[in-house]
Image: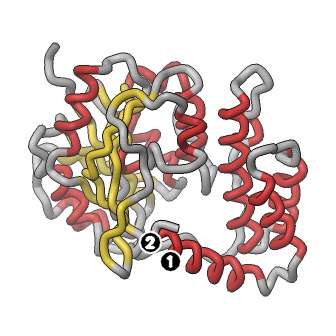
Amino acid sequence: MSTPTFSVIIPLYNKEAEVAATLRSALEQSLRPLEVIVVDDGSTDRSAEVVVSFRSPLIRLIRQPNAGVSAARNRAIAEARGEYVALLDADDRWRPGFLAEIASMIERWPDCGLYATAFDIVSDEGLVPGRTPRERGPVDDFFTRSMSCYVAIPSASVIPRTLFAEVGLFPVGMKLGEDQYLWTRIARCRPVCFSPERLVLYSRVASNRSNAVYTPERSRHTLEELYDASASEASNEYVARVALGKALVISAKGGTEEAARTVRFFGWTRLNRRLLRKVRILNALPAAWRPALLDAYNRLAWRLARKGL
């Protein structure tokens, strides 16, 4: 079997301080990518100029008006020439063996729809291992495993380019959960392959984090549309978990009615009752209180997670 070819796709929006390290991590892979496609999604800083300064024949910069991360990824996928699309966010990095490990898994398990590796979290307190599976190879049940750990995050995921014609692209206009939306479509039709090698550095400290001001999504896609009575219970429960987690954030930002709609739709969940109660409680509080309360809760959860609790 010949070595697979990889198109690295990087959506870019106001990551002037981080994108150079991201690009270096792609160019310094022990297995050289076919190309690195950067889609500048209407940045207002010098992000694009940083990309141009590399002058690498592998890097292709595409500029477009701001349309969101899904639109930027989809544009890069449309431009890609490699057999596999390797996702990489503009504030994350790969260790040098990432693509080589993905290629090794493809050679051994060629029929999977998504290949991913473990990752370390870059935080203010240093590196923290992400909670991921320990076994190498096809995951026994992506949805069940993803309820308790991270099987796939965007910067650690690679997808066969031809599969997008079957499952569709990223949901344009969706601000949160767009990656899990696509993972659900993939995992319902193909196995997901995982490596416990920690070959990705996921940043929690990058600039340009999500704005705290609530603005409704403008997308024809929703997580609700993924509910499928003919699909496995685990896959529907996974979608409910993603949607309710998203509703927590939306409620904290002031999206009271949108969070309430999510609660009404996913009120049937059996495995996410505690999360459902959190959304209901947060959404019942005055909107001005919610951001600080959710932030305090998340900080406590992060401290406990670091201690393995």
**Residue 168 appears in the picture as rendered:** no
* In this view, 195 is above or below 254: above
Q: Quadrant of residue 196?
A: top left
Using residue 57 as the reference point, say whether residue 283 is left or right of it. right
Q: Amino acid at mark 1?
A: Arg
Colour pattern? secondary structure
The front one of 77 and 253 is 253
Q: Quadrant of the N terminus?
A: top left
Q: Residue at x 52, y 47 (%)?
A: 70
Query: Mark 2 and 1 residues: CB-CB less than 8 Å, in contact?
Result: yes
Q: Position of residue 130 (x, y in %)?
A: 40, 58
Residue highlighted by disc 2:
306
Q: Which mark is residue 294?
A: none
SS label for mark 1: helix
Q: Position of residue 69 (x, y in %)?
A: 49, 53
**Residue 73 appears in the picture as rendered:** yes
Q: Residue at x 25, y 60 (%)?
A: 22
Q: Residue at x 11, y 55 (%)?
A: 55
Task: Tell me if mark 2 has few (under 14), some (14-19) or many (20+) residues whose alpha carbon lies within 10 angstroms of its own.
Answer: some
Q: Residue at x 86, y 45 (%)?
A: 265
Q: Which mark is residue 303?
A: 1
* In this view, 238 is above or below 55: above
Using residue 151 as the reference point, say whether residue 15 is left or right of it. left
* In this view, 225 is above or below 64: above
SS label for mark 2: helix
Using residue 76 as the reference point, say whether residue 242 is left or right of it. right
